[in-house]
């Protein structure tokens, strides 16, 4: 099995009628059907919806519509609403929920000619870092099926890494796109807060949530991102900051100021990953970039701050999943209170329950000031750290994760260890700045080749710069083009 | 029980639905009476992933109210989430304003000149409506879910049930006038919670207060306060203490009963709604709202008295509602006689509307038609009793009064030849009265004119009859 061609080539083939409009969609559905199960990555195939969106495609092309994603199959994380298909959020409580509407990002993809082919597995309500918290089954990493693909968008990362689809949407609250992208060796963007509409993304931590893009390369991710970005009147937190035209070419790095946060070289980070970061610094320097070491003084508070803000907001956001209006209800109970208790106890898994309880506590009268209030203040200090950094440099570069992909079950018994998987990513969510994880080759562990991810962070609205620098760094590690062994052996 | 040395202390929380085109946070119509769950969308039904967007018109209406009561309008405000579970609340939280309301302070002035201070007024969204009519299950209608509400909180400045009643009446008049809300308690567009306590006259501190719910009319508010104050006095005077409670008013029994103790009250876990950015309110917007304010009822009433010479009563009735004021002004302009217009509207038209318990819209008499009717009386084509009959016939259909007058045969008879015959017969039939009149006893004319009216079925023009009578008696 080969990778799909780069997205622009696929679109050109469809537009020039070298292939039928459904060519890539059909191939993608075939691959998903054949291998999606092995990877535990797919919760549902959206064949009917795909047919419905494919049907008018020829006429739309003939009519001269500008379709920047014509015929490109895309998988969607199952916490993003796609009308008429189940949107489970990886939870029992929404097992049979079919939203009556499309998320804005989905609507924009379809308008651009893309075709939704699958809904992908995730940690329940996007709460987790390994996709082991899915209420249905854990997702696997195509580089080593005994390992996790990261999370919470593990299903989307897994299907892109295994070349079952060329691109997918995920969502981030604290690293849920970048960490799985790093674990599976693909590109994953967390946009600036407000860059992509959250309308139709089932809320977890509203002030942190963003829909992000997965693709094999930064250039492909840039194309998808350009389609879904921009102001949406249905999301009051979306920004009307202009969307720059996509120009995802690698760039001349001469004079580019690259900051290396000292946290990236912390001894807690796998030495092989640190070595890859150093090697990348050398290459950048050789290409004419200016390297500066700097510090984000409040970065060490990112994890505790994140777990207060995110859980507090989640405790309120998840209240609507009560089995009364939508969601699965338990058998009738003696009174309303017990009905709520039973519906929710039965519907939510352990991690979601833990976070709802944490968040409820943080917002409780008498604790609000000590937790949520204070966390919001730390958050603004962290945002200030980033602003100060971007007065000195154009982008920050560091590892995306402290370790390569870990094994299933390795961290499930220790939630705190699991939370620390987000230590390098949560800062960008708290500060609202964009960050891109890109593949930087592999390391070998226990006989498996495992991808390494590096992370570029920039000031608000600098996505295009991140894509261009990212494309340059990708080119330093050509062997990263290889597909995972699982896929190479397949038809 | 001696109540004379006790003072009742009342504060009111009034929720009014704002007359916006669409709901507070989505594009669904803000309307009453549609079939259940038809005015809904992913946002107001709390679908996973749906997001609120604040309604600008709701801000404008709240500011309009703020200007009218001389409140301070926030330059920067935000929305918060009030978290609690109930089946009429699909999101599991209500979007409200906790510590930064859209308006702060202000006052409503009573007839006596006493100012009732307001603490604040804040924007929030209404919940759906639950029904418990079917055995075995309950139903919910989410049409009301997300309708904008303004919660107006008064200071504990009211000192009697009557003051509370008057405050509510004035508040309603103001809100209707400003077209901020319909304030129709029957349709739930105005709801009221009452806080009542008592204290010894002259005491510096307030007593423990109880909150009363389930008040369905201003009268029941008044009665509930009186009953609750008496209960407090009785408890205290018999050596007991009042506990902070929420109590339900039973309108039939005329008493309140315990709903829940306050110490078990819920923790709503308020926090700023992360889906809604802070709202900065520009001075230009505040000024624009001020410039486009409708005339306030008291100012309009004074103008009616000053410019049109209307009575206290008529001017009061005509400023109850902007639609009524507008109607009055149109009739008045068309017939050129504001006093007559005021009379016909406040006495005759309202009389008909009251009988049917209907509004101006149902009465369906265009201002121009009512003006024509007034014109027919003034020109002597019809007398007042006939005109009242014609008005009755116009009610609900707005037909041409002249046509109706002719159809019903109610046109006034001013034709001298016909009337002379009737007057002659009247004199012949009442020789005693005729004699008295000749003697200059003016009172005797009543019997004669009465006879003529009876004979003419009330259509004789009294002026012409009097003329003829004078001529005949001179001869």
Image (cartoon, grey):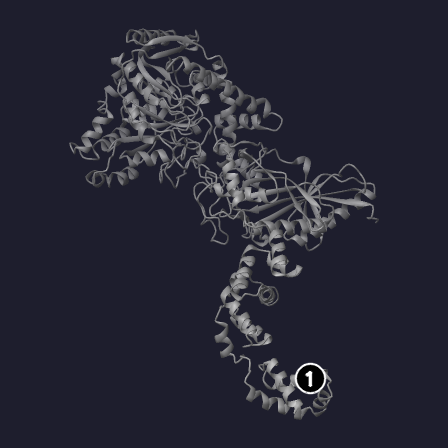
Q: Is residue B453 visible?
A: no
Q: Is residue B237 left or right of residue B143?
A: right
Vertical placement of residue A305 versus B395, above or below: above
Numbered-mark total: 1
Q: Is residue B452 visible?
A: yes
The image position of residue A82, as x and y in percent, is: 36, 37
The image position of residue B309, as x and y in percent, is: 63, 61
The image position of residue B194, as x and y in percent, is: 67, 45
Depth check, front residue: A291 or A46: A291
Vertical placement of residue B160 versus A185, above or below: below
Looking at the rendered image, the quarter that the C terminus of chain A falls into is top left
Vertical placement of residue B410 versus B125, above or below: below
Q: Is residue A475 left or right of residue B85?
A: left
Task: Report the residue marked by disc 1.
Answer: B445
Q: Is residue A321 left or right of residue B115?
A: left
Depth check, front residue: A418 or A210: A210
Snapshot quadrant of residue A43: top left
Snapshot quadrant of residue A24: top left
Vertical placement of residue A271 versus B459, above or below: above
């Amino acid at each position: 099995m080969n990778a799909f061609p780069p997205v622009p080539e696929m679109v050109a083939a469809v537009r020039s009628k070298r292939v039928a409009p459904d060519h890539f969609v059909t191939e993608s559905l075939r691959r998903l059907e054949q291998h999606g199960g092995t990877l535990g990555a797919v919760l549902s195939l959206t064949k009917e919806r795909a047919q419905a969106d494919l049907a008018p495609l020829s006429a739309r092309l003939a009519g001269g519509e500008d379709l920047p994603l014509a015929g490109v199959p895309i998988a969607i994380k199952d916490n993003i609403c796609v009308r008429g298909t189940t949107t489970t959020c990886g939870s029992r409580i929404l097992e049979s929920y079919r939203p009556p509407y499309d998320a804005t990002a989905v609507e924009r993809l379809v308008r651009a000619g893309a075709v939704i082919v699958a809904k992908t597995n995730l940690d329940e309500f996007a709460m987790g870092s390994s996709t082991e918290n899915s209420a249905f089954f854990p997702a696997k990493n195509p580089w080593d099926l005994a390992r996790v693909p990261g999370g919470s968008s593990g299903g989307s990362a897994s299907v892109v890494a295994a070349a079952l689809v060329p691109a997918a949407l995920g969502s981030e609250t604290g690293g849920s796109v970048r960490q799985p992208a790093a674990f599976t060796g693909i590109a994953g963007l967390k946009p600036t807060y407000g860059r992509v509409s959250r309308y139709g993304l089932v809320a977890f931590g509203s002030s942190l949530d963003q829909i992000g893009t997965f693709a094999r390369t930064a250039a492909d991710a840039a194309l998808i991102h350009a389609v879904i970005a921009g102001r949406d009147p249905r999301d009051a937190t979306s920004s009307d900051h202009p969307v720059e035209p996509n120009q995802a070419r690698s760039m001349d790095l001469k004079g580019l100021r690259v900051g290396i946060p000292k946290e990236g070289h912390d001894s807690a980070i796998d030495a092989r990953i640190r070595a890859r970061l150093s090697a990348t610094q050398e290459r950048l320097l050789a290409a004419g970039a200016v390297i500066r070491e700097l510090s984000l003084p409040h970065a060490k508070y990112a994890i505790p701050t994140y777990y207060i803000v995110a859980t507090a907001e989640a405790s309120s956001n998840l209240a609507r999943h009560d089995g009364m209006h939508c969601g699965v209800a338990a058998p009738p109970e003696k009174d309303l209170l017990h009905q709520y208790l039973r519906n929710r106890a039965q519907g939510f898994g352990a991690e979601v329950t833990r976070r709802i309880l944490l968040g409820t506590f943080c917002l409780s009268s008498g604790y609000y000031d000590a937790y949520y209030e204070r966390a919001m203040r730390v958050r603004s200090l962290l945002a200030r750290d980033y602003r100060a950094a971007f007065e000195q440099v154009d982008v920050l570069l560091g590892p995306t994760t402290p370790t390569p992909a870990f094994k299933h079950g390795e961290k499930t018994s220790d939630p705190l260890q699991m939370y620390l998987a987000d230590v390098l990513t949560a800062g960008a969510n708290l500060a609202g700045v964009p960050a891109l994880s890109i593949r930087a080759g592999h390391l070998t562990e226990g006989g498996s080749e495992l991808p390494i991810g590096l992370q570029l962070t920039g000031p608000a609205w600098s996505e295009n710069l991140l894509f261009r620098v990212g494309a340059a760094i990708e080119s330093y590690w050509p062997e990263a083009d290889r597909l995972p062994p699982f896929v190479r052996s397949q038809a | 029980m001696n109540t004379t040395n006790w003072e009742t202390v009342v504060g009111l929380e009034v929720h009014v639905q704002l007359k916006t085109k669409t709901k507070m946070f989505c594009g669904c119509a803000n309307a009453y009476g549609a079939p259940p769950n038809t005015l809904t969308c992913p946002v107001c039904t709390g679908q996973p992933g749906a997001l609120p967007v604040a309604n600008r018109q709701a801000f404008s209406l709240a500011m309009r109210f703020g200007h009218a009561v001389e409140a301070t309008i926030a330059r920067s405000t935000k929305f918060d989430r009030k978290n609690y579970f109930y089946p009429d609340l699909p999101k599991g939280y209500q979007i409200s304003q906790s510590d930064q309301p859209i308006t702060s302070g202000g006052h409503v002035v009573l007839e006596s000149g006493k100012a009732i201070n307001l603490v604040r007024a804040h924007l929030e969204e209404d919940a759906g409506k639950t029904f418990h009519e079917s055995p075995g299950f309950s139903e919910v209608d989410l049409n009301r879910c997300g309708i904008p509400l303004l919660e107006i909180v008064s200071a504990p400045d009211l000192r009697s049930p009557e003051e509370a009643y008057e405050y509510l009446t004035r508040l309603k008049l103001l809100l209707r006038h400003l077209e901020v809300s319909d304030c129709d308690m029957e349709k739930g567009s105005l709801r009221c919670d009452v806080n009542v306590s008592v204290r010894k006259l002259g005491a510096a501190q307030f007593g423990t207060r109880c909150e009363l719910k389930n008040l369905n009319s201003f009268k029941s508010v008044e009665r509930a306060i009186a009953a609750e104050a008496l209960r407090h006095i009785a408890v205290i005077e018999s050596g007991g203490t009042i506990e902070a409670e929420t109590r339900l008013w039973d309108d039939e029994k005329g008493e309140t009963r315990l709903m829940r103790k306050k110490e078990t009250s819920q923790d709503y876990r308020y926090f700023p709604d992360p889906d809604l950015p802070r709202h900065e309110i520009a001075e230009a917007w505040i000024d624009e709202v001020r410039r486009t304010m409708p005339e306030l009822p008291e100012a309009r009433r004074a103008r009616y008295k000053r410019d049109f010479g209307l009575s206290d009563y008529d001017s009061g009735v005509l400023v109850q509602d902007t639609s009524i004021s507008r109607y009055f002004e149109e009739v008045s302009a068309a017939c050129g006689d504001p006093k007559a217009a005021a009379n016909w509207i406040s006495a005759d038209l309202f009389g008909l509307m009251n009988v049917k318990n209907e509004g101006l819209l149902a009465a369906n008499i265009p201002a121009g038609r009512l003006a024509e009717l007034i014109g027919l009386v003034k020109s002597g084509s019809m007398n007042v009793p006939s005109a009242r009959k014609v008005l009755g016939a116009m009610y609900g259909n707005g037909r041409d009064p002249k046509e109706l007058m002719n159809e019903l045969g109610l046109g006034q008879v001013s034709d001298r030849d016909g009337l002379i015959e009737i007057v002659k017969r009247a004199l012949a039939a009442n020789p005693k009265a005729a004699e008295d009149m000749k003697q200059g006893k003016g009172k005797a004319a009543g019997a004669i004119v009465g006879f003529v009216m009876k004979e003419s079925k009330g259509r004789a023009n009294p002026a012409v009859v009097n003329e003829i009578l004078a001529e005949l008696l001179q001869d």
